[in-house]
Image (cartoon, rainbow, N blue to C red):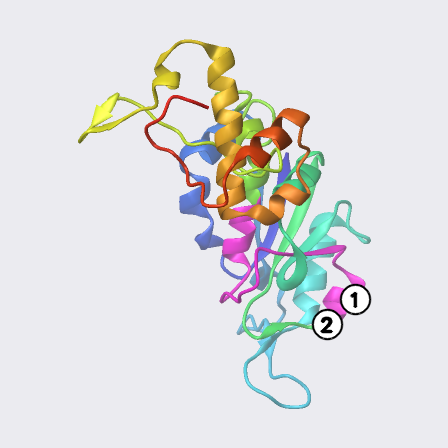
Amino acid sequence: MRFDVFTLFPEVFLPYLNSSILQRASAGGLLDVALHNIRDWTTDRHHTTDDAPFGGGGGMVMKPEPVFTAVEDVLGAPPACPLILLTPQGRVFTQEVAFELAALPRVALLCGHYEGIDERVREHLVTDEISIGDYVLTGGELPALILIDAVTRLIPGVLGDPTGAVDDSHASGLLEYPHYTRPAEFRGWRVPDVLLSGNHAEIDKWRRQQALLRTRLRRPDLLARADLTRADEKYLSSLPDSETPSQDTSEP
């Protein structure tokens, strides 16, 4: 999968892209991230990319000319792939949106900065707007990295465990179940016996019920949209209102 990222600060991306899973995905030919510095498409000697807003007010606004020129030079006119503006005004990024984007061969990301971006870019160039939450950052670079990371994990072959992304929180509409590793006992806290039993059917059942329990306690709003089985609903109805996650029981 290819990402084209249009930004004023390409150097922000390199340390993260050159680390861990994303670096391995790139080395394996599964991920291609092209960073395009919008300043390279300016025409004045100061490489100006922003100006004061019409009508007054604080902050600076990114100018439309270098953005349009950069995008059209790289992607064509109209753009050859979806062009997403990272903005707190966009639709909220979720695991469902990540799956949607992972099905595409190419996606372009536009990182805003300063006070914002000229509205004509939104109206006549971008094809989608995505927000990572109801808060404001200095620019779109961190949201772009978050989107790239979340989407890349869903590309077949990127994760060592082919089912890893399927079990993640939100992938099934629920929060993920608890994880444990060696040692089996640490400072008197034991791993639940069911995880040491070797009984994979019981382990799967325990994990499902722990995911249901954790979701009910931490994000009950997700249950209304989750695809629940009759067994799931029976388990949830059996829980008292004060139920809390158990750390030491082997009984699912």
Question: Which label number is shown at residue 123?
Answer: 1
Give SS at disc 2.
helix
Please tell me which residue is depicted at 62% across the width and 50% down the height of the picture.
93
x and y percentages locating residue 108 in the rendered image: 67, 48
The quarter holding residue 227 reads: top right
x and y percentages locating residue 7 in the rendered image: 56, 58
- Which range is magenta? 119-147
Q: Is residue 57 above or below residue 26?
A: below
Give SS at disc 1.
helix
Q: Quadrant of the N terminus?
A: top right
Instruction: Determine if the magenta segment contains residue 226.
Output: no
Q: Amino acid at mark 2?
A: Glu
x and y percentages locating residue 48 in the rendered image: 57, 73
Closest to the observer, 103 or 135? 135
Decide: marks 2, 1 in contact (CB < 8 A)? yes
User: Residue under circle 2?
Assistant: 119
